[in-house]
Amino acid sequence: MPDAARILLAGGAAVAFALGAAALAVLHLLPTRVDPIRDAVSDYGRGPYRAYYVVQVVGMGLGALLLTVVLAVGLTAGTFGLLLLAAFGLCRIGIAAFPADIAGQPGTRRGRVHVALAAVAFTAIAIAAPLLSIELASAASWRTVGAFLIALAAGVPTALLATYAAATLTRLRGIFGALERLFYVAAISWLMVVAVQIVAAGSQVVAVGR
């Protein structure tokens, strides 16, 4: 892939991640009545501020897909990690059409699809981040940020496991929202660092393993 195309796609991914992160931040400032300590991020996907939630999930998904193309064509990263990154992107975009059910009310088909897409997306990025980070860190142009990238990537599955624990353990349920948001911060930070490093390295980026 030409350097200019790689930088353009990675830059587009970084912009998409930034827009998604900004939309999520704005949701926390609006009068949504969603408790960030207890409630899920998906609770923002209902009501008058739903548009911000859609921007958040589509931004994350589109950015992940652009990053997948860059890593697949420009950096020849491992296939399994790339498939997981693409799955994350597709599920994040798809989830925009399936709002979560309201707690305490009968479940719906759309709500069940939402849960399934969220589970696939979260698990996919939690596995993809460490796998791809290890592969990227082996390239010469990534060695300056390789250790940081791997450490950041390790935080993604760690935060996800804590989130899943809060979803299943009664005594942790009251802080589910806080733990899920910690997972969001870890995942978004990792995605942004990868995209920005590709842009910053420019023509110095080399294929993984070369």
Image (cartoon, rainbow, N blue to C red):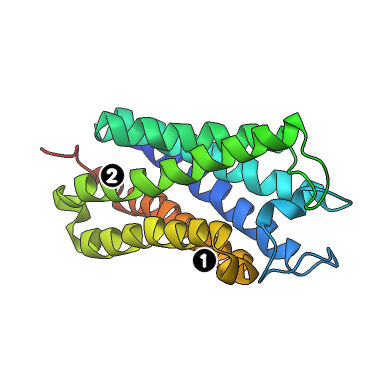
Question: What residue is drawn where x is 31% and y is 37%?
Answer: 81
* Residue that label 1 marks: 182
Disc 2 residue crowd, few under 14, some 14–19, many 20+, Cα 10 Å: many
Q: Is residue 197 above or below residue 73?
A: below
Disc 1 residue crowd, few under 14, some 14–19, many 20+, Cα 10 Å: some
Identify the element where label 2 is drawn.
helix
The residues bearing labels 2 and 1 have C-alpha atoms spaced at a distance of: 21 Å
- Nearer the camera: disc 2 or disc 1: 1
Which sits earlier in the primary sequence, circle 2 or circle 1?
A: 2
Q: Is residue 200 left or right of residue 171?
A: left
Q: Residue 16 at x, y = what percent?
A: 57, 46
Report which quarter residue 112 is drawn in: top right
Closer to the camera in the image, 114 or 65: 114
Q: Residue 71 at x, y = what percent?
A: 32, 36
- Does residue 1 show up? no
Q: Which mark is residue 132?
A: 2
Q: Is residue 98 above or below residue 167?
A: above
Question: What residue is drawn where x is 14% and y is 51%?
Answer: 140
Residue projecting furthest to the left? 210
Tell me the kind of residue under disc 2.
Leu
Residue projecting furthest to the right? 48
- Does residue 96 show up? yes
Position of the C terminus, as image quadrant, is top left
Q: Is residue 30 left or right of residue 58?
A: right
